[in-house]
């Protein structure tokens, strides 16, 4: 039954992971400096050509994804035109209107559960493809695949539990409130956690009975298309319920946003893009959910669990080379411990091994593209002008890294309070350090940006964790941990970090409309 990835030529020997625990759990970064005998295996580029069991609409040539560690071709994927986007939407609309999908929760649960099985069977190969296409370490890629499977599994269960409510309104009237699918959902997703963030929208949207058109980021289409193909090959999935179009956001993405037959846009990406999409979608009052950027504070109090907080501070900002929307890119440290804490963090950071994500001794891989490398190096220049670069602050090209997009993990102190490094998202491994005198100042600094996606608090005082956790305006507050995500728990942003929530029950309900059926049993109207 399952075709597609299973037959692709991927390097053997990568262990599969079991689907357990949190939805994704970026690895901790303490990795041995010991040299290894790592040798990069051979690779035959994947060719993902439309229609792939009706999944892919693309007649405008091919997109090529490059390995950010070496510049080698990883895959080619059929590229869509705006006419292909129209065809994908038409197929989705037809399937939504005519198939059993929206009215059969048991069917949806069955199909989604089978997707977890095919994903699990392919997980080792998916993880390798993810590392080769996106750059993150293989350990982190395994975590992302396991998280995606976990997300499907959770939503497969929810497909049979989409309960409404009922109320007796008077002796002769009652109301029933139902949750119905929105209709055709366009999921437009980014390149940093391409698998997880696509499935985080697709799984609940399908579980709720919608038809979905996916537009992956142009830098990482292959991992998304390969994983979706495992579902598209299921014989019980009605044709057209899941389609994908790969292509530029400005044309193909915009076509989905403005298409009259698309009912909802589920967007994850940059805040500027999100604002643009919301304006464009307003013309026909589409529903939008927006998961956007961040500049998250990681607040370390003097009574923090020391070693855990040190590991957490590094993991928060350097995991996936800082290309995480929730990256703890602002470290706020209590003045009384700042000197020692930052010195130990700098030591730990200097010891991190940067290199090819397939090398098991590497703690941090490359940035996703040459363009992202340029952007991050521009912020490094700002850091040099506005503060003191304590560690890093350079592109890495020696020891076989010249063909990749590698940058050293960087810590910056003494920043001018007006520096852009304190308010703008870098999306790279650059940590800005600030100190605070007391709790009030910590809260004020934490809330000093236009974002509100996530924050970390490190303290042994549960009362303080409660007080400060309530005072910081952001969608997730991690206490004595960081970057732990659970399919059951909502994520999302305050302020310019977004609108609506993903994951958990609220994440599922985003993909529904509420309908009230009102019954009157009286013999006459008045
Ligand atoms: P991006 O906004 O450039 O692109 C995201 C997606 O939108 C891509 O598929 C792109 O092709 C598409 N797109 C671009 N312009 C469009 C347009 N005008 N109309 C329709 N679609 C368009 O973001 P990116 O560079 O891929 O990802 C990085 C950003 O994503 C960062 O800002 C990061 O913080 C954010 N992000 C947020 C979350 C979250 O959950 N809040 C998660 C991951 C990434």
Image (cartoon, rainbow, N blue to C red):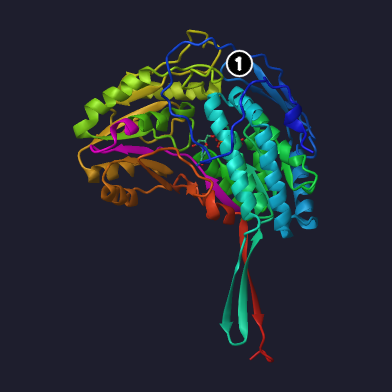
Horizontal side, residue 213 vs residue 407: left or right: right
* Vertical arrangement, residue 470 with respect to residue 519, above or below: above
The residues colored magenta run 287-309
Q: Quadrant of residue 309?
A: top left
The quarter of the picture where the N terminus appears is top right
Residue at disc 1, CB closer than 8 Å to ligand 1: no
Ligand number 1: quarter of image: top right
Q: Which residue is mark 1?
A: 71
* Any part of residue 261 in sight: no
The quarter of the picture where the C terminus appears is bottom right
Q: Position of residue 308 (x, y in %)?
A: 34, 33
Residue 288 on the magenta span:
yes
Could you say whether the residue bearing mark 1 is in a helix, strand or loop?
loop
* Vertical arrangement, residue 108 with respect to residue 194, above or below: below
Q: Position of residue 522 (x, y in %)?
A: 66, 89
Residue 10 on the magenta span:
no
């Amino acid at each position: 039954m399952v075709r597609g990835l299973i037959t692709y030529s991927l390097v053997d020997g990568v262990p599969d992971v079991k689907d357990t625990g949190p939805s994704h759990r970026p690895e901790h970064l303490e990795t041995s400096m010991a040299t290894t005998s790592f040798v990069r295996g051979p690779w035959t580029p994947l060719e993902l050509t439309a229609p792939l069991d009706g999944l892919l609409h693309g007649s405008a040539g091919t997109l090529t994804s490059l390995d950010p560690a070496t510049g080698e071709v990883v895959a080619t994927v059929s590229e869509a035109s705006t006419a292909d986007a129209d065809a994908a939407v038409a197929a989705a609309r037809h399937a939504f209107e005519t198939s059993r999908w929206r009215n059969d929760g048991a069917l949806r649960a069955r199909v989604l559960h089978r997707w977890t099985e095919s994903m699990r069977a392919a997980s080792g190969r998916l993880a390798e493809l993810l590392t080769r296409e996106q750059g993150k370490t293989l350990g982190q890629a395994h975590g992302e695949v396991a998280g995606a499977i976990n997300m499907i599994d959770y939503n497969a269960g929810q497909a049979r539990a989409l309960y409404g409510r009922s109320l007796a309104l008077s002796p002769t009237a009652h109301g029933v409130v139902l949750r119905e699918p929105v209709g055709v959902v366009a999921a437009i997703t980014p390149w940093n956690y391409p698998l997880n963030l696509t499935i985080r929208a697709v799984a609940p949207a399908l579980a709720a009975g919608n038809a979905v058109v996916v537009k992956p980021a142009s830098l990482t289409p292959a991992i998304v298309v390969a994983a979706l193909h495992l579902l598209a090959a299921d014989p019980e999935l009605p044709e057209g319920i899941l389609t994908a179009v790969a292509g530029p956001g400005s044309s193909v993405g915009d076509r989905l946003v403005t298409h009259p037959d698309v009912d909802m846009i589920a967007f994850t990406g940059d805040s500027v893009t999100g604002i643009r999409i919301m304006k464009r979608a307003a013309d026909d009052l589409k529903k939008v959910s927006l998961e956007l950027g961040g500049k998250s504070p990681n607040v370390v109090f003097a009574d923090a669990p020391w070693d855990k907080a040190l590991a957490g501070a590094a993991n928060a900002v350097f995991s996936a080379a800082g290309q995480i929307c929730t990256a703890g890119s602002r470290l706020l440290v209590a003045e009384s411990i700042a000197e020692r804490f930052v010195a130990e963090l700098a030591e730990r950071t200097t010891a991190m091994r940067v290199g090819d994500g397939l090398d098991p001794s590497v703690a941090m891989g490359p940035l996703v593209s040459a363009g992202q490398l340029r952007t991050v190096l521009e912020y490094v220049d700002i850091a040099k002008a506005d503060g003191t670069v304590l560690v890093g602050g350079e592109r890495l090209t020696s020891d076989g890294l010249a063909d990749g997009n590698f940058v050293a993990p960087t810590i910056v102190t003494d920043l001018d309070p007006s520096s852009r490094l304190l308010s703008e998202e870098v999306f790279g491994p650059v940590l800005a350090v600030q100190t605070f005198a007391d709790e009030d100042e910590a809260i004020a600094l934490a809330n000093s940006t236009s974002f509100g996606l996530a924050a970390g608090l490190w303290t042994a005082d549960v009362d303080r964790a409660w007080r400060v956790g309530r005072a910081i305006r952001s969608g997730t507050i991690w206490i004595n941990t960081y970057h732990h995500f659970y399919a059951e728990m909502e994520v999302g942003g305050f302020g310019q970090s977004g609108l609506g929530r993903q994951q958990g029950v609220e994440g599922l309900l985003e993909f529904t409309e509420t309908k009230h059926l009102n019954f009157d049993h009286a013999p006459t109207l008045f």
